[in-house]
Amino acid sequence: MRYLVLFFMLVTISSAVAAKNLKGKIFYLDGSVEEVKFRIPVDFLSGNPKYHIIQEGMKYYQGNSLRNLDPSGVDKVILANKDEIITMVVVPNFDGKGEVIKGAGSEIFIRILKEGALNLYELAQTFNTGPMIDANGMVMGGGQSISHLYLLQFSEQELHRIETPFKREMAEYFKDCPKLVALIENRYITKKDIFLMVDFYNNSCVE
């Protein structure tokens, strides 16, 4: 049991400090582009970026100095991680219901998954898990888990988080496209089909 606790402690500590350098580009609002190397916190086991951290701020090297990237003046950032290209765009930290990330600045970085007349974003959120009891009845400390929230955005409009009740909310949101509303109301498109829903709007609802 002692070794198991030690293992979890090592994983927790390693996860807290794990980071790697990723090549990428910064696209500024004035049209200029800068090729840089980012210092990105990553998951200790998977090596994937910790989006819940970089959403609030990113660091990059300028010479030998590590600097914070101010989102104001930035349009987007593109990172190359393994065989994956990751695009993080700068958006206002507000979605009509309040702050998207509570306590963050007025602008945040968020991962964009689909781009068009309707954009689809993915937000990583953290929440604390309670203590666990093992097979021997010993209480082990809780941890932190990550959940993912999808947000939509029409061009030049504010972010809109996808919540429940899905059918009623999305039917109202897409009222300018009766074809899509019909698919949603008849359950041909459900909350599991968010990517399909965004593709349908961009391909079939935009003149």
Image (tube, rainbow, N blue to C red):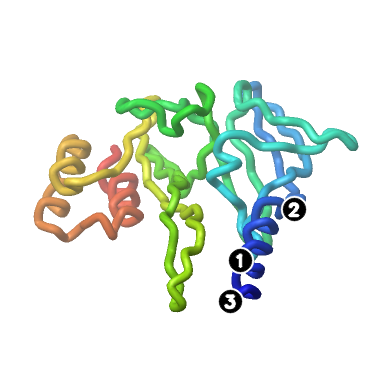
Coordinates of residue 107 in the picture (x, y in percent): 52, 26
Task: Specify few, some or many for label 2: CA neighbours under 10 Å numbering under 14, 14-19, or 20 or more.
Answer: some
Task: Specify few, some or many for label 3: CA neighbours under 10 Å numbering under 14, 14-19, or 20 or more.
Answer: few
Coordinates of residue 185 in the picture (x, y in percent): 11, 51
Q: In the image, 37: left or right of 81? A: right
Coordinates of residue 121 in the picture (x, y in percent): 43, 43
* Label ID, residue 1: 3
Residue placed under numbered mark 1 in the picture: 8
Tell me which residue sits at (13%, 43%) in the image.
168
Amino acid of disc 1 = Phe
Amino acid of disc 2 = Lys
27 above or below 131? above
Q: How far apart are marks 2 and 1 (CA)?
A: 22 Å
Tell me which residue sits at (21%, 57%) in the image.
189
Q: Can residue 180 be seen in this view?
A: no
Q: What element carries label 3?
A: loop
Q: In this orientation, which residue lies closer to the viewer: 139 or 109?
A: 139
Tell me which residue sits at (34%, 51%) in the image.
199
Residue placed under numbered mark 2 in the picture: 20
Q: In the image, 53: left or right of 140? A: right
Q: Is mark 1 on a helix, strand or loop?
A: helix
